[in-house]
Image (tube, helix red, strand yellow):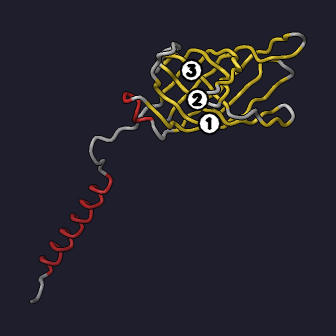
Amino acid sequence: MVMTEKSQRTGRSLGLLLGLLALVLMFLPVGHATAKQPLHGVHDYVFVNEFDPARGLVLVWEGTVSGDIEGCTQWWAAAPPAVTGQASHYDLRWEIWDSCETDATLLLAGSESGSTTVRHLKNSNWRTNGVVEEAAPEFEEWIGRRSHMSGNFEWVFIDGVPVPSHGDGIFRLN
């Protein structure tokens, strides 16, 4: 079969059109995918430093959280921080509860690693990064997402010994 010049042009045009269509289809979104906005909040907390024998952990800080989520926030540690100079490094479990009452419901929880910089016992800063590991049904979409928290705290002297007192900070889940 001999192709005429006209049929060759038509074939090339059809091939070009099919190639462009395939390229356009490759970049069309699948379904209704949208980017999830971060979950933000602020914390106000006090130093607790109480060992819970049932959990085998120390409740280091406890306070309130507000913003995109409201409730009670807690940080738990299994071991004291490793201190190098003015910095300490630690691993924590963080939890956000719907209230600070004993019958509260856990909303979100995860693990983090972080560091604190102690600046001559004045307004020390901390920063942690981790991952969401547990969530109530209304927050299940956050499991596996990254957590980022930071803040500061003040010191008080009790019998001449410096002790962390209270602070505030922010958090973001991505």
- What percent of the width, then of the height, locates residue 77? 67, 31
Name the quadrant containing residue 94: top right
Q: Position of residue 91 (x, y in %)?
A: 67, 36
Q: Is residue 134 above or below residue 164?
A: below
Query: Front-most of 68 and 79?
Result: 79
Separation of residues labelled 1 and 3 (CA atoms): 14 Å
Task: Residue 112: give its label.
Answer: 1
Q: Amino acid at mark 1?
A: Glu
Kindly report the distance in space between the C-alpha atoms of the residues bearing marks 3 and 2. 7 Å
Numbered disc 3: secondary structure: strand
Q: Position of residue 48 (x, y in %)?
A: 69, 17
Q: Is residue 71 above or below residue 26?
A: above
- Mark 1, other Cα within 10 Å: few <14 / some 14–19 / many ≥20: many
Instruction: Please identify the residue farthest to the right as the structure is shown.
Output: 160
Give the residue pinned by disc 3.
Answer: 73
Mark carried by residue 159: none
Q: What residue would you read off at disc 2?
A: 94
Dot placed on the residue nearer the N-terminal end, 3 or 2: 3
Q: Do the numbered discs 3 and 2 sit on residues whose CB atoms are within 8 Å?
A: yes
